[in-house]
Image: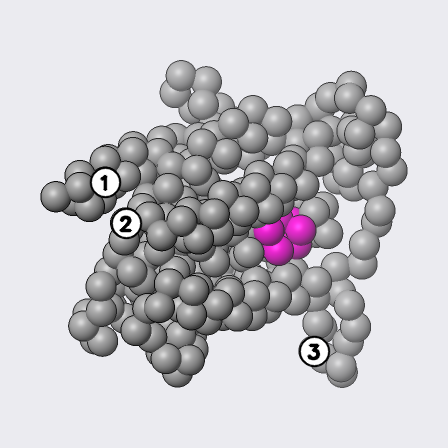
Amino acid sequence: MLSYPHFDPIIFRLGPLAVRWYGLMYLCGFLGGYLYINYLVRVRNFALSRDDVGDLIFQCIIGVVVGGRLGYVLFYNLPYFLANPLRMFAVWEGGMSFHGGFLGVFVAGMIFCWRRKLSRLMVGDLLAGAAPIGLFFGRIGNFINAELWGRTTTVRWGMVFPGAGPVPRHPSQLYEAFFEGVFLFLLLWWFHRRHFPLGFVCFAFLFGYGLCRFGIEYFRQPDAHLGLLAAGLSMGQWLSLPMMLTGVAGIYYVCQRGAK
């Protein structure tokens, strides 16, 4: 069994302002995404300027924060937030849904493409390539916050998380950081380098993330107030299924389109 490295969620204070690790992880994810998208624009010779990329990232920041929080409220804990509506705004305490954040970024990206008259598949490929960077830092933030821990286990690397009882649990946040972050980033980077048809990376991300999340959910403790849903699947698994189906259909579509 490994010892959980207890972190103070607050890095430092400036008077009443508390700078938290969770917020810093989001900042690192957005900055890394901005730099990486600029790199991809050069590699794939896309017609986007640095100002365009900056505007895209800014709109996606709004989309991921608003969508991620609304997704968590609606998908995971609606009765609690209906009883405590002001807690909806306490994002510094954690509680963000990837699937909600994804929908928020989707809407922001569509608006960006409509205003700039840009290819949605091109912008989708760029955002998909950078998404694992944000996922990696977000899962590290979950680990630092000691939230979203895994199911009980007897493996040697199991950890006793504060607030999760005395038994060791899978550090599922780190599993997700590796598979949804590192592994998926490298896979999509390879697709970008091979210059697959426009849209392939975007739909490959949908399938790849859905598959990774679906599998890791078997090691992650379901939310106590939700438990397992129909067919013994968690909420995260049910939300990942349409992502995988859309990914498969989209890959087929862009490959057929590219073959013509």
Asked if residue 211 lies in the magenta stretch, the reply is no
Q: CA distance from mark 3 to mark 2?
A: 47 Å
Q: How many numbered callouts?
A: 3
* Vertical order, 109 against 219 (above or below): below
Disc 2 residue type (three-letter): Pro
Instruction: Find residue 219 and report its image quarter.
Output: top right
Disc 1 residue type (three-letter): Cys
Asked if the residue under mark 1 is in contact with the one under mark 2, i.e. CB atoms within 8 Å, the reply is yes
- The residue identified by callout 1 is 255
| Residue shown at the point (79%, 73%) measured from the top left | 12
- The residue identified by callout 2 is 197
Quarter holding the C terminus is top left
- The residue identified by callout 3 is 17
Count neighbours of disc 3 (C-alpha within 10 A) and say few if under 14, some if 14 to 19, many if 20 or more. few
Pick whichever of labels 3 and 2 is earlier in the sequence: 3
Count neighbours of disc 1 (C-alpha within 10 A) and say few if under 14, some if 14 to 19, many if 20 or more. some
Count neighbours of disc 2 (C-alpha within 10 A) and say few if under 14, some if 14 to 19, many if 20 or more. some
Majority secondary structure of the magenta segment?
Answer: helix
* Vertical order, 21 against 229 (above or below): below
The answer to whether one can see residue 149 in this image is no
| Image: magenta residue range | 136-142
Asked if residue 140 lies in the magenta stretch, the reply is yes
The answer to whether one can see residue 3 in this image is yes
